[in-house]
Image: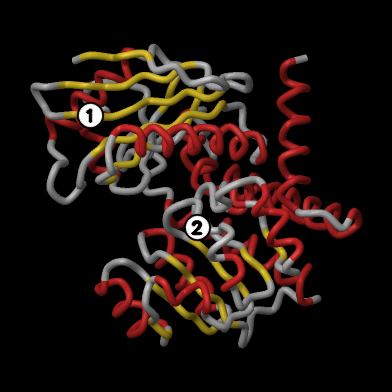
């Protein structure tokens, strides 16, 4: 197996992983260890080449630095990707090789479950390294983080609704959800229970049928979700979907979802603000999953209480961001990044 250094200004360490024996091709990106060891999930996707995978890894690892800092965790930001179709290319050999690559990072990076991965996959990786979380079994096992991620997003939607509409009550509110993976379907369940009406889309038909049958959702084509009439748009799939093309299509008053790096560029936060759309910064809204994973990394004994307290503090942070943005009449994303940057500067001092 080869670990090949990649030049990435602004990141502490980035390595390309190539293992001819297993067929593994991937990347581990460590953005910052300023607050602690870098932590962030492993994603497996059929990327369109190495450069596309690298761009995703760099964006995601930077996002994890901000997410962990916003959640008040003593963890830095990192991310890993495997290039390949998880339905076709995933194998024990690939996962074992990736585990050896994580072990070679000597504790600088902790991996966990993300898109295309499961707790069972984490167990396979864990046969080769101790620097893995999201396990189903063990003294501090945190399991699938998806339900906690969805709970944090649900809290963020409540807070965003209160700021945008004057009430956190979601009864009768229309929420458009993009992406019905583990997080998206859990979010549907929470929103349906709160009386919201759902508009959903996904690249696969099966989860859309499930959402229609279980939650009475309205299913639309993938491209149609941007123009769907709703109160709140909740992106829960891939990143960079809020851009100069999609933002003018939006027929919503607010955006609050679980996808990482929803803004294609920093300008898109301002673009939403100018359109009168309240944006809940994604690295705050989707922090529930890493809070859950952190209990395993940090060896937290009373997990449920600790997670509950951290989720409450995260919601307070979101409320503070949206309040300050309203007072200053600026984009909430800029306010959120300023708060996190301040925390990182204090840690450096």
Task: Say left or right for 293 vs 68.
Answer: left
**Image coords of residue 92 (percent x, y):** 13, 34
Between label 1 and label 2, give the one nearer the viewer.
2
- Give SS at disc 2: loop
> Mark 1 or mark 2, which has the lower sequence index?
1
Quarter of the image with the C terminus in it? top right
Between residue 315 and residue 205, name the one nearer to us: 205
CA gap between label 1 and label 2 equals 26 Å
- Give SS at disc 1: strand
| Residue bearing mark 2 | 241
Q: Considering only vertical position in the picture, is 140 above or below 227?
A: above
Residue 149 visible in image: no
Q: Which residue is drawn at 38% across and 36% down?
A: 112
**Image coords of residue 258 (percent x, y):** 52, 56
Neighbour tally class for label 2: few under 14, some 14-19, many 20 plus, Cα within 10 Å: some
Image-quadrant location for residue 93: top left
Q: Residue at x 57, y 59 (%)?
A: 153
Looking at the rendered structure, which numbered label has been put on residue 25? 1
Q: Residue at x 57, y 27 (%)?
A: 75
């Amino acid at each position: 197996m080869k670990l090949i250094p990649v030049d990435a200004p602004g990141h502490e360490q980035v390595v390309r992983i190539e293992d001819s024996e297993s067929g593994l091709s991937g990347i581990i990106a460590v953005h910052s260890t300023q607050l602690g060891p870098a932590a962030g999930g492993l994603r497996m996707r059929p990327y369109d080449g190495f450069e596309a995978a690298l761009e995703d890894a760099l964006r995601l690892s930077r996002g994890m630095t901000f997410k962990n800092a916003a959640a008040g965790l003593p963890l830095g930001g990192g991310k890993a990707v495997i290039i390949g179709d998880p339905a076709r290319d995933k194998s024990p050999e690939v996962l074992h090789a990736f585990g050896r690559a994580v072990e070679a990072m000597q504790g600088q990076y902790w991996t966990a479950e993300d898109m295309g991965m499961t707790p069972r996959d984490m167990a396979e990786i864990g046969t080769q390294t101790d620097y893995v979380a999201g396990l189903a079994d063990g003294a501090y096992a945190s399991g699938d983080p998806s339900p906690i991620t969805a709970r944090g997003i649900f809290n963020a939607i409540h807070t965003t609704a209160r700021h945008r509409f004057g009430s956190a009550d979601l009864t009768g509110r229309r929420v458009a959800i993009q992406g019905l993976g583990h997080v998206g379907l859990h979010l549907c369940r929470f929103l349906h229970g709160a009386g919201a009406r759902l508009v959903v889309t996904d690249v696969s038909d099966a989860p859309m049928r499930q959402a229609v049958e279980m939650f009475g959702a309205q299913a639309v084509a993938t491209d149609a979700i941007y123009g769907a009439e709703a109160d709140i748009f909740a992106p829960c799939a891939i990143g960079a979907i809020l851009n100069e093309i999609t933002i003018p299509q939006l027929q919503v008053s607010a955006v609050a979802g679980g996808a990482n790096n929803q803004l294609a560029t920093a300008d898109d936060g301002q673009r939403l603000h100018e359109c009168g759309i309240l944006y809940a910064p994604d690295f705050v809204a989707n922090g529930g999953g890493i809070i859950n994973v952190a209990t395993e990394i940090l060896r937290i004994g009373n997990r449920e209480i600790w997670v509950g307290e951290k989720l409450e503090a995260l919601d307070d942070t979101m409320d503070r961001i949206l309040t300050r943005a309203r007072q200053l009449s600026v984009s909430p994303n800029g306010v959120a990044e300023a708060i996190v940057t301040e925390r990182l500067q204090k840690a450096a001092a």
